[in-house]
Amino acid sequence: MSTHFVGEGNIGSAPEYREFPNGNDEPRRLLRLNVYFDNPVPTKDGEFEDRGGYWAPVELWHRDAEHWQTLYQKGMRVLVVGRTERDPWTDSEGNPRETWQINARSVGILPYRIESVTLSPKPSNAGSQPPDEQ
């Protein structure tokens, strides 16, 4: 079972990158993030209090995951879009357990605490770009 998910939170630890063999094709690439999704509620004094926030593992499967591992950093504010998935498992004592994780379609970096942004150059396929971008 899964459901649509959109949430804003902070990355809590360094991203974890893994590669999985895929026969003769390119390996499947996974970037795993640990994100705290807060729930800021305004208080009477004009401040905010977190009520009901939670940690969730976020999995992002993408061919560029290895490169993105250096972009995403602990403490970074992100917007995650994807779906929640229930992951049942059994602990070492044989008790049934479950974890909820997020299978992300995209993880956007929000501009909080960002000092600068550097874009890579566009590919040089002059024939495939619209005339106003050539």
Image: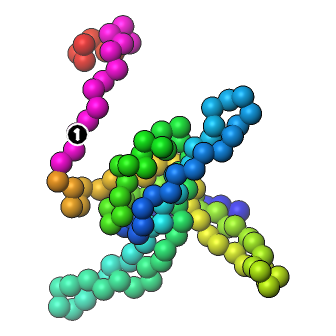
Q: Which residue is at a point 17% across and 85% down the rendered structure image?
A: 46
User: Which of these two is toward me, 66 or 88?
Assistant: 66
Q: Is residue 104 visible?
A: no
Q: Which residue is at a point 21% across and 55% down the rendered structure image?
A: 114
The quarter of the image holding the N terminus is: bottom right
Residue 37 falls in image quadrant: bottom left
Type of amino acid at the residue the image marks with label 1: Thr
- Magenta residue span: 116-128
Which residue, as the protein is rendered here, is positioned at the far top?
A: 127
Residue 118 x %, y %:
22, 39
Residue 122 falls in image quadrant: top left
The quarter of the image holding the C terminus is: top left
Q: Is residue 107 visible?
A: yes
Residue 13 falls in image quadrant: bottom left
According to the image, what is the colour scheme of the structure?
rainbow
37 w.r.t. 32: above or below:
below
Which residue was labeled with disc 1?
A: 118
Q: Which residue is at a point 43% across and 79% down the rendered structure image?
A: 53
Residue 130 x %, y %:
31, 15
Query: For this view, does 105 lie left or right of residue 91?
Result: left
User: Which of these two is toward me, 49 or 55?
Assistant: 55
2 w.r.t. 49: above or below:
above
